[in-house]
Structures are given as structure tokens and as C-alpha cells.
């Protein structure tokens, strides 16, 4: 029984007819699962590569493609930020629907928990105002029912969180395999080791050239974003052309600026309060402080809602930059490999 490594980086038994396995030839198959894993880790770590590599295995070529990196980063980003709006927009448009469902489920559970907590608070308040034993018994039943729903919603949230963690590990591993495979591809392209010309390399190079030409570089947006302040974040979101991110960046900037202004005003009011001797003045200042604090509290939900979306925007720009790099790196490596193998075959 022989073992090979799947494109996902897992060791598996090979059931294909000898010489017809899509995951490589004799050099890519091993007697035991452990040997397969060790060989894969050695190859992708860039250490202990065989001195006479005769083939670029389909596994290495597949894992080094920019598509693998792009997909893994996109899924991991969605799972990490758990952005419900993005999950809705991507529904039915991505290969791994389980990722979308996991994000939607944790969102549903979160909403249910908030709803049940609010209902439970109201039920407990009504229970405290009960005037008769009958009313009290009815309110207790209602509170118990809401508490049971809250328990279920919490269990649903915990289950969704576990699933998301599992999926994050899956795509973190896939991304690690991709990064290591791309590095291995580049090292093989630069090495003097004899390699066999990969089938379809010319077609792949042309595909990569077309992709490379079609990329609108994200670097100008990244440069604006790298300047750090909230005005630049708004400018970057506008340059990126996303209303979703522009709204989030604008909300965060405007609410933050207003909050800072109100906090400065509070410091001034507090100073007046500290030195005031007249009781009427103190009462008036305390009222102003109360109004000021209320105004600040109304800004907090806006800031809390905008911050995760802005963080997602920054991660998306970072990942877009890495995607551009992947396309360039894969293209350059394959061009070098194609030139070397053409010289040999020529």
C-alpha cells in the first residue's frame, strides 16, 4: 500500500492504478503514512530537499498557485472577522459554503443571545413588580422559558465558535502549505538541480501573464492606509471604491472626532466643577456633565460597529497585496523553470 500527499497537505492512501495517480509519480509515493508526511514537511520547509529532483510534483505546483493562497487568505479573513454582511454577499459564490454557514450561524446565535438577555431582564423586572402569587407564578414561568432559550442560544454560539476555530485551523494550515510550496518552487527555479519540464507550463505562464496584466495594483491604497490616521483611512477606502468600507471608515472617524471633542469639554466642565463654590453653579455644571456623558455614550455603539469593519478593510488590503506578490512570484519562478527545461530539452 502506498501513500501520497493531497493538495490539502494531508497524507492519504493511494488507490489509483500504478502510474496514473494525479498526485505524482513514483517519487511522490511512500511506503508509510509517516514517510509521506516527513517527506512533505522536508520539501515544504525548504530543508533536506533531494539533491536530484527529477520532477516538479503536481502537488507542489498546485499548492504554490496564487489561487490556493488567495482562497485560503479570503476564507481565513472571513472566519477571523466573522463579518455577517460579507458572508451574506458571498453566499452561493464561494466553493466552501461551510465557511459562510459558520459565520452566519455565529451571527444568528449572537443576535439570539442579545435578544434573550434583553427579554430575561424585562421578565425579571416584571417579576419584581408582581403583586399577586398568580402573577408571580406566571412571570416565573416566562422567565424560565426565556432562560432556557438563552441557554440554547449560548450552546449554539459555542458550537459555532468551535466550528469556526476548526475551519480557521484548516485554512491556516492550507495557507502555510501554500507559502512553503511557493518558496520551494522559487528555490527549485534558482537551483541547478535537473528537473523535468512540467506539463502545461507554457499555458500556465500565459494565464499568469494575463492575470498579472489585469491586476489593478493595491499598493497606492496600501500606501495611503499606511499613513495611519483616520482621515487617511477614509481616503484609502474611497480610493478602494468600496462603499461598505468607506461608510465604516467615515463613521469611525466622525464618531471618534466627536467623542474626543466631548471628552475635552468634559475635562473643562470638571475643572469648573472642582473650583466652583456656588451650589447653583455646581448643579448647573453637573447637569452639563451628565448631558455630555450621555452624548458620549450614544457614540460608543457607532464606534464599536465601525472598528471591526475598518480592521477587516485593513486586512483585506494587506491580503490583496500578498495576492499580487503571489502572482508575480509564481510567474517569475515558472518562467525560469520553463527557460531551464527548454534549454535541456533543446
Image (tube, rainbow, N blue to C red):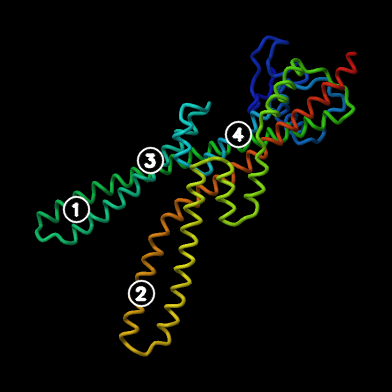
On the image, the x and y values in percent for residue 122 come to 24, 55
On the image, the x and y values in percent for residue 279 come to 32, 87
Distance, label 4 to label 3, CA atoms, is: 24 Å
Q: Which of marks 1 and 4 precedes in the sequence?
A: 4
Q: Residue at x 34, y 49 (%)?
A: 114
Q: Which of marks 1 and 2 precedes in the sequence?
A: 1
Residue that badge 3 annotates = 108
> Is 169 situated above or below 259?
above
> Is 57 situated above or below 142?
above
Distance, label 4 to label 1, CA atoms, is: 49 Å
Q: Residue at x 36, y 66 (%)?
A: 294
Q: Are marks 4 and 3 in contact (CB under 8 Å)?
A: no
Q: In terms of secondary structure, where does tag 2 sit?
A: helix
**Residue that extends furthest to the bottom in the rendered view of this protein:** 277
Q: Residues within 10 Å of mark 3 (few under 14, many from 20)?
A: some
Residue that badge 2 annotates = 288
Q: In terms of secondary structure, where does tag 1 sit?
A: helix
Q: Which of marks 4 and 2 precedes in the sequence?
A: 4
Distance, label 2 to label 4, CA atoms, is: 52 Å
Residue that badge 4 annotates = 72
Residue that badge 1 annotates = 140
Amino acid at each position: 500500500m502506498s501513500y501520497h500527499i493531497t493538495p490539502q497537505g494531508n497524507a492519504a492512501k493511494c488507490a489509483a492504478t500504478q502510474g496514473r495517480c494525479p498526485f505524482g509519480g513514483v517519487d511522490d509515493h511512500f511506503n508509510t503514512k509517516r514517510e509521506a508526511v516527513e517527506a512533505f514537511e522536508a520539501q515544504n520547509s525548504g530543508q533536506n530537499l533531494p539533491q536530484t529532483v527529477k520532477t516538479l510534483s503536481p502537488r507542489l505546483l498546485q499548492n504554490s498557485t496564487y489561487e490556493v493562497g488567495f482562497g485560503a487568505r479570503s476564507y481565513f479573513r472571513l472566519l477571523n472577522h466573522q463579518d455577517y454582511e460579507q458572508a451574506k454577499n458571498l453566499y452561493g459564490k464561494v466553493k466552501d459554503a461551510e465557511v459562510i454557514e459558520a459565520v452566519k450561524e455565529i451571527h444568528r446565535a449572537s443576535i439570539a443571545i442579545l435578544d434573550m438577555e434583553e427579554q430575561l431582564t424585562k421578565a425579571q423586572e416584571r417579576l419584581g413588580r408582581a403583586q399577586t402569587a398568580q402573577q408571580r407564578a406566571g412571570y416565573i414561568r416566562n422567565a424560565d422559558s426565556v432562560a432556557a432559550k438563552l441557554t440554547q442560544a449560548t450552546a449554539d454560539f459555542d458550537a459555532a465558535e468551535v466550528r469556526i476555530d476548526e475551519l480557521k485551523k484548516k485554512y491556516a494550515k492550507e495557507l502555510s502549505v501554500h507559502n512553503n510550496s511557493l518558496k520551494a518552487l522559487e528555490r527549485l527555479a534558482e537551483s541547478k538541480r535537473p528537473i523535468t519540464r512540467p506539463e502545461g507550463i507554457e499555458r500556465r505562464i500565459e494565464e499568469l501573464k494575463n492575470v498579472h496584466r489585469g491586476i489593478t495594483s493595491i499598493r497606492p491604497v496600501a500606501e495611503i492606509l499606511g499613513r495611519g490616521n483616520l482621515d487617511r483611512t477614509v481616503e484609502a477606502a474611497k480610493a478602494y471604491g468600496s462603499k461598505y468600507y468607506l461608510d465604516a471608515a467615515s463613521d469611525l472617524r466622525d464618531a471618534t472626532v466627536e467623542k474626543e471633542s466631548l471628552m475635552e469639554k468634559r475635562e473643562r466642565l470638571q475643572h469648573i466643577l472642582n473650583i466652583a463654590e456656588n451650589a447653583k453653579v455646581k448643579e448647573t455644571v453637573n447637569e452639563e456633565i451628565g448631558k455630555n456623558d450621555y452624548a458620549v455614550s450614544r457614540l460608543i455603539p457607532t464606534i464599536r460597529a465601525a472598528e471591526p469593519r475598518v480592521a477587516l478593510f485593513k486586512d483585506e488590503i494587506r491580503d490583496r497585496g500578498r495576492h499580487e506578490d503571489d502572482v508575480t512570484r509564481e510567474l517569475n519562478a515558472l518562467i525560469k523553470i520553463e527557460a531551464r527545461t527548454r534549454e535541456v530539452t533543446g
